Amino acid sequence: VSPEVRATVFGWVRSTFYEYFQYSNDNMDNQVRDEYELAVIPDGYRLLSMVEMTDGKTYLFANDSGNILRFAYTYGEKHDSLFIKAEDYEQQVGYVNGILADIYLSTKEGETSVIAWQNRENNVLLRVYAIANRTELIEIAENVRKKE
């Protein structure tokens, strides 16, 4: 099944826009707005800041080497879009706790890679950005939990 068709079933649609992968959501049926967090923060990282927006949150973590790890989630309102640059990234498919995920691995040493997946229950798009390999990205993503 193509990513566009697969995503349409769940609300977020992935398409290509110039050198970007674009995630858009036209679904307005978002009634439940759970909050999410990284239940386990990778060794050496500490929380720098949290930015709250009307449609989600972004958490920034840093380590002593200056590497940034970003965890974000977005519910998306009508005509909301998210862009992930496709140039210099190898796109792969993986799983986060059994949920299909898009993985974007940087082809440049020391550059940030991305994993994106969706919680179908409330149509939220979750992402982790980090200087990490495929396995590390999946491990970080599998530690995302709903806040109690």
Image (cartoon, rainbow, N blue to C red):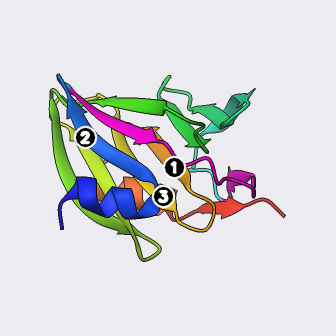
Res 136 quadrant in image: bottom left
Amino acid type at image mark 1: Leu
Q: Position of residue 15 (x, y in %)?
A: 25, 40
Amino acid type at image mark 2: Ser
C-alpha span from label 1 to label 2: 15 Å
Question: Could you tell me which residue is drawn at 36 percent across and 57 percent down?
Answer: 8
Q: Are marks 1 and 3 in contact (CB under 8 Å)?
A: yes
Mark 2: secondary structure: strand
The answer to whether 143 is drawn above or below residue 56 in the figure is: below
Magenta part of the protein: which range?
Answer: 20-39
Q: For mark 2, does the 10 Å Cα neighbourhood hold few (<14), some (14 to 19), or many (20 or more) residues?
A: some
Question: Could you tell me which residue is drawn at 17 percent across and 22 percent down?
Answer: 18
Front one among 122 and 138: 122
Front one among 103 and 24: 24
Residue at the spot of label 3: 118
Question: Could you tell me which residue is drawn at 75 percent across and 52 percent down?
Answer: 35
The single residue placed furthest to the bottom in the displayed view is 98
Which label belongs to residue 125? 1
Question: Could you tell me which residue is drawn at 64 percent across and 58 percent down?
Answer: 40
Res 99 quadrant in image: bottom left
Q: Position of residue 95 (x, y in %)?
A: 36, 69
Q: Position of residue 50 (x, y in %)?
A: 72, 30
Residue at the spot of label 2: 15
Q: Position of residue 59 (x, y in %)?
A: 65, 35
Which label belongs to residue 97? none
Amino acid type at image mark 3: Gln
The answer to whether 79 is drawn above or below residue 97 in the figure is: above
